Amino acid sequence: MDIRVNDELIMKKPHPCGDNRFLVLRVGMDFKIRCQKCGREVMVPRKKVERNIRKVIRSED
């Protein structure tokens, strides 16, 4: 799956704060993503992220 830094991910499961939109900050074996509502940053394994993505919104840089 082609996911880049600054892409917005809409996930199947929401963050505990209630939002399901995340911004990609780092890509590698793990993804560093930031919740768009509360700003919390988490490191998640690539496999878990790719399995739970509903939609990718590409940033046009």
Image (spheres, grey):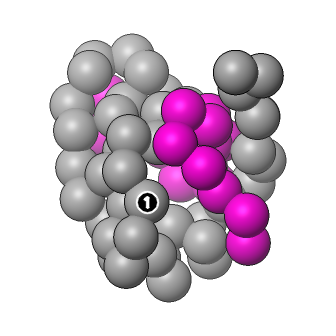
Residue farthest toward the top in the current orientation of the protein? 37
Question: In which quadrant of the rendered view does residue 36 lie?
Answer: top left
Q: Residue at x 73, y 64 (%)?
A: 2
Side of 10 relative to 27 (left or right): right
Q: How many marks?
A: 1
- The secondary element bearing badge 1 is classed as loop
- Residue 58 screen position, x and y as percent: 76, 34
- The residue shown at (78%, 47%) is 55
The C terminus, quarter of image = top right
Relative side of 40 to 5, left or right: left
| Residue 4 location (% of width, % of height) | 60, 49
> Is residue 30 something that shows in the picture?
yes
Q: Which residues are magenta?
A: 1-18
Relative to 35, 24 lies left or right:
right
Closer-to-camera residue (42/30): 30
* Badge 1 amino acid: Val
Classify the position of the N terminus by image quarter: bottom right
Q: Is residue 55 magenta?
A: no
> Which residue is tagged 1?
27
Q: Quadrant of residue 8?
A: top right
Relative to 50, say whether 42 is above or below. above
The image quarter in which residue 15 lies: top left
Q: Residue at x 62, y 37 (%)?
A: 7
Question: Is any atom of residue 18 visible in this view?
Answer: no
Up-down: is 15 above or below 51? above
Secondary structure, magenta segment, majority class: loop
Q: Residue at x 45, y 75 (%)?
A: 46
Residue 5 lies in magenta, yes or no?
Answer: yes
